[in-house]
């Protein structure tokens, strides 16, 4: 009973931290705000996260990264083709950005840019999270007939496009960069079954 | 004489701010550090930037964005083809990231993610900066035969790829995401003269 309550408190802190990191980044989020908004006493923080804010942030990244990976996997599983999956992924990104007033982009990009050069713990967790997402995208492409190496390369490229388009959408407060990226990636995977993907001029 | 010294002081503050925003982001950069490292008294800050940190950051973005735009324009002008320009741009991004120990990625991405939803002044300056870079990329593509609208769409997509690939490179501390993106974009513009760009399976 006691333990379960502790676990609840811990999860509440992780959820609030993930939310604040996503919308405000690492340096913009103080421990005070995390504790206040998750209704947690300061003692619980150092009990559950003896490494303090850095450890809390790294675990919150792992948590929200895993949730995003499940969401991507669900979308990939229920889509009829890679093209449909791409449409659904961009739709989800656009919905989250727009509904949040352009504050909810990638859950870890802000933190990654702020902290990767300065915290090995956070850098490793961000890198692992991105690799997890790439894995889902590569699986999607491989299931559709692309060979393994090509699928991995294309997945890395897709993730770059997702991340860059979310940054531009957030900055311009517009869905247009997402729509642009969606169109280009849809064309890229249109004939993915032929086992090669490249970008060429139309005949 | 007096005025020229004031302008020097102002530029020194802007340069230091741009440098720190690039490597540490907005919230990670305190006014104290800017003043100390640019050897400027606090009074000069509010004399030149009555709007304080927010105004200083917005003008530093405009400054470093303009410098980056000139660099992109130089690369575009001296390259023999859009493909060569893309190679040279990725080489420059990779060089800056690697030589700085993965701290010098996009000069404004961290700030844009941190601040766009919360500061209209910074959001407008970031949006304008990105538009300036897109303009150079669109010009490059248009000069090579792509029609205007297609060139603009492709330029937006290229910038998304640049931004996403720099984020992944910085996180993984690896040139691989840049190399991957370079290869894909080179293929995309390989036949740009035929006046259409799409991504399709190889025959």
Image (tube, coloured by chain):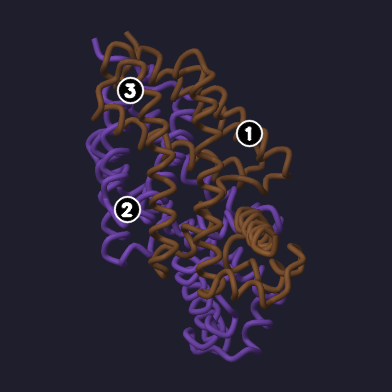
Chain colours: A brown, B purple
Residue A75, by quadrant, is top right
How many residues crowd mark 1 within 10 Å: few (<14), some (14–19), many (20+)?
many
Residue at x-position 30% and y-position 19%: A200
Could you tell whether B176 is left or right of A101 in the image? Answer: left
Is the residue under label 3 in contact with that under label 2 (CB below 8 Å)? Answer: no
Mark 1 chain: A
Q: In the rendered view of the protein, which quadrant contains the N terminus of chain A?
A: bottom right
Identify the mark at residue A4; answer none if there is no mark: none
Residue under pointer 1: A94
The subunit carrying tag 2 is B
Residue B166 position, x and y percent, is 38, 50
At label 3, counting other C-alpha atoms closer than 10 Å, the crowd grade (few under 14, some 14-19, many 20 or more) is many
Q: Is residue A10 left or right of residue A120?
A: right
Q: Secondary structure at mark 1?
A: helix
| Residue under label 2 | B93
Task: Look at the image and tell me whether residue A20 can be seen.
Answer: no
Where residue A2 sits: x, y (%)?
Answer: 69, 64
Judging from the image, what secondary structure is the residue with disc 2 in?
Answer: helix
Residue B22 versus residue B132: which sits nearer the camera? Answer: B22
């Amino acid at each position: 009973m006691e333990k379960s309550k502790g676990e609840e408190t811990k999860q509440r802190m992780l959820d609030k931290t993930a939310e604040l990191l996503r919308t405000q980044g690492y340096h913009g989020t103080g421990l005070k705000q995390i504790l206040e908004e998750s209704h947690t006493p300061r003692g619980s923080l150092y009990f559950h996260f003896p490494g303090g804010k850095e450890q809390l942030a790294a675990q919150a990244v792992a948590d929200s990264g895993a949730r995003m990976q499940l969401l991507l996997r669900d979308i990939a599983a229920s889509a009829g083709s890679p093209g449909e999956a791409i449409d659904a992924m961009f739709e989800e990104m656009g919905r989250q950005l727009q509904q949040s007033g352009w504050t909810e982009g990638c859950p870890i990009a802000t933190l990654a840019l702020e902290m990767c050069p300065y915290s090995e713990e956070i850098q490793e967790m961000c890198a692992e999270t991105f690799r997890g997402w790439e894995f889902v995208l590569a699986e999607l492409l491989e299931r559709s007939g692309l060979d393994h190496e090509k699928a991995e390369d294309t997945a890395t490229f897709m993730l770059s496009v997702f991340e860059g388009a979310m940054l531009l959408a957030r900055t311009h407060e517009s869905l247009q960069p997402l729509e642009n990226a969606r169109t280009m990636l849809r064309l890229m995977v249109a004939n993915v079954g032929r086992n090669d993907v490249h970008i060429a001029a139309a005949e």
